[in-house]
Amino acid sequence: MSIPKTYNPKETEDKWYKYWLDKKFFRSVPDDREPYTIVIPPPNVTGVLHMGHMLNNTIQDVLIRKARMQGKNACWVPGTDHASIATEAKVVALLKEKGIEKKDVSREEFMAHAYEWKDKYGGIILKQLEKLGASCDWDRTRFTMEENLSEAVIDSFIHLYKKGWIYRGIRMVNWDPKGKTAVSDEEVIRKEVNQKLYYIKYQVSGSNLPAGMEGNEESGMGDGHIIIATTRPETIMADSAICINPNDERYKHLKGKKILIPLIGREIPVIEDEYVDMEFGTGCLKVTPAHDLNDYELGVKHNLPVIDILNDDGTLNEKAVILIGEDRFIARKKIAAMLEEQGNLEKVEDYKSQVGFSERTDSAIEPKLSLQWFCKMSEMSGPALKYVLDGEVKLIPDKFINTYKHWMENVKDWCISRQLWWGQRIPAWYNEKGEWVVAKTEEEARAEFQGQFPNSPAGILRQDDDVMDTWFSSWLWPISVFDGFKDPDNADIKYYYPTNDLVTAPEILFFWVARMIMAGHEFRGEAPFKNVYLTGIVRDKKGRKMSKSLGNSPDPFELIDKYGADGVRVGMLLCSPAGNDLMFDEAYCEQGRNFANKIWNAFRLVKGFEVDPNLENTNQQAIAWFDSAFGQALVEIEDNYKQYRLSEALMGIYKLVWDDFCAWYLEMIKPAYQQPIDSETYRITISYFENILKLLHPLMPFLTEELWHDDLFEERPELDCCIVAPYPVPGNIDSNLLQEIQIIKQVVSEIRNIRNIKQISPKETLSLSIKANSEINYSNYVTIISKLANIDKTDLVSEKISGAASFMAGTDEFFVPLENNIDVSAEKERLEREIDYLKGFLKSVEAKLSNDRFVQNAKAEIVDIERRKKEDALAKMKILEEGLASLVN
């Protein structure tokens, strides 16, 4: 078939993706092959593809496609997470558009609306992954709220509750007033915010200040009052005490005194604690146990009352006494104005501080005492830490081990309840007295009541209204996707578990990766995966994290439309070292597209060769060299893959294809204009191209599949596709030949450089004289040099040739006679530059060799390399100095 001049991704991508699906190439079932399994980090059911997903899923697809080609039973399990907070917010907003409030519908009605929304929009991101080329086993697609997976969540809750690892209690939690639910520490995003620091006067009750202290503002005291700095004046109505540092001489007179809260006049005690920073603000602290975690701990220590003045939606309640029903931020401004009006506001300063925001709703987090369900972490963190420290689970790169260790050794109990309806409902049941049991069904709950409360009839039972944290379902993901809870000994879980690689982001290392390891140990007795590849954050070229709010994140589909899926995949991987942030620039995608075009054009060149079966093969050296070059490159590429250096593996393939194959090998074997090629070289070149397509396929699946089916190759059976072609393996590597061809390439480049400097046409033939100081047999390479450098005569000489352009390659000297056209001064300048460079190079090498610590501690082969560098540099300098002397004379 004729091949177009340029590659058009739009004509190939949908065609081949459909073909792969139709032929079930992504499908995996247990068999006698070695399994290779990846479970997708389930994207939120509310999500659409963004650049982070593009990077993460490109990496997964490269790994899964390569394993498939290596003969492993590759299984990539896709799915989505029900995303409790985000999805509920979407459904509440949808209902509002219809004029319906959540409070006005039943739970069952709300869930019906939620499932309707999920069915309509929930699979968008998975369909989008197909455009990227993701070769997931779509028949295995799972959803964290489907029946079997939800049942697994309920069963695991009951299991841990019976072990005493899940409990119910009142604790300070992160409260999202917009979502009206508790959120975990990991779902709180810290942002630096411009705020105000309000200096408020608190009246001292029934006491006079000591003489000489009146009006001393620096001490935080004035006539009968003290001054306290706070960023949250709206919480003064919840104050339970004023705290001073017992070592602060300024406030000794306040010990045992009472203070009046401004605006409401409630009396509160002065307490002492070294926790107070005497340098911050005025050195006095207002203690508000209901609205600050540190204040809460102070309150517990000093037995202070807890006064919660905020409703769940962030408005002031009746305990605030004033401004009831006002939003907390509106109340802040109004309180400040009221304080100023009454003369209780000393001053206001600009102030920057870190404030927590809900990852899901972007609402400012409120610390809040709340009755919640918690899961003990200390019992499970030990084994999960041991897996990583012992190397049974490898974190890639390993720089994250210390972070992981710190988290696991300082782990806090996990608040697993959420005040939502969308999610797995907590299996706790309450009777009319408020007594409760944990059971899977109401029937089982009644039986539990009979056993636990024999003298208290169950009566009407009510199930807990809360649902479990979304992460409490996704921590079971590697087990539940294979129905490991429903049927612990089924064929899938026994074959695919533990999985091989997990590809995810470092920011969820603790609250997803670590918890999956905990769950794997607890429920299967082994870790759920062997390797965790941690990607970096996708940033723009200025280093800013890509986000919709900054407007610096490109639309992935516009990129695919512009550069093709293969071009975007290559672009993402070109700048994505494991664990380091990716500085994305659209130019990388352009480079990926250009690489695709380079391969396409090389294919067109080979396809266009005319073959003469009667011609003798004169390209043995070029063929033997590329054979070794391919093998050597493959060894390095495989080493990079094994160490999960995908960016380096790609660059190795890129160099092999663009430089070694296109720029050198094809030029070495290409016949003269309108001349045929011999059949043996042609056959071997086609086989090389096949291997290159195999090597490229995991990275560029669409382009390679398109070329694989071209009629340049022998007719292929229907299922002979690049996606399942055997991945190349290294052959024999002739190191000497590789070194010698490296010299030949340098010779060709130097001759081309001489032509460029002297403005000699590439069509004009030149002659070459070689003064060989090495053991290279240049007669083996005359054909290559002649073809690539347009040399019509090559001879060996024993002396230097005066009046010729000269250069060195390795330790050998080369001379190109230019019929008195040589510019002696320019040649002299060039030689002097090379000598100066070598002097600097020698200086750095000799500095290393004169360093006793380097010589004693470095590996012997490293020291030998440095010594050989010195010897080679000295030999080259001697030759260059001789050449310079001949010009001077």
Image: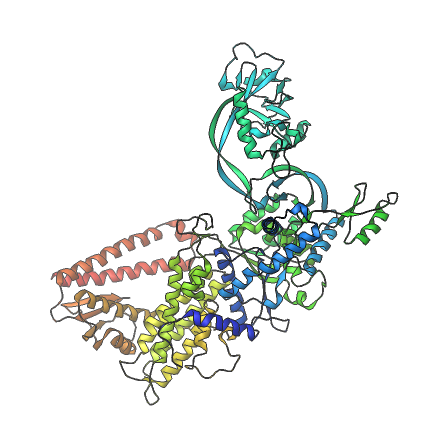
Quarter of the image where one finds residue 560: bottom left
- Residue 573 visible? The answer is no
Quarter of the image where one finds residue 234: top right
Q: Is residue 322 above or below residue 31?
A: above
Quadrant location, the C terminus: bottom left
Looking at the image, which is closer to me, 347 or 115?
Answer: 115
Q: Residue furthest right?
A: 455
- Residue 106 visible? The answer is yes
Looking at the image, which is closer to me, 763 or 405?
Answer: 763
Q: Is residue 147 above or below residue 666?
A: above
Q: Is residue 70 above or below residue 551?
A: below
Find residue 300 and report its horizontal and vertical position in percent. 67, 31
Q: Residue at x 62, y 20 (%)?
A: 260
Position of 394 with respect to 542 (left or right) is right
Q: Residue furthest front?
A: 99
Q: Residue furthest top?
A: 211
Position of 386 with respect to 549 (left or right) is right
Quarter of the image where one finds residue 763: bottom left
Find residue 22 and report its horizontal and vertical position in percent. 56, 74
Q: Which coloring applies here?
A: rainbow
Looking at the image, which is closer to me, 811 or 146?
Answer: 146
Find residue 11 and report its horizontal and vertical position in percent. 44, 72
Q: Residue at x 69, y 62 (%)?
A: 484
Looking at the image, which is closer to me, 428 or 216?
Answer: 428
Find residue 337 and report its horizontal and vertical position in percent. 52, 26
Quadrant location, the N terminus: bottom left
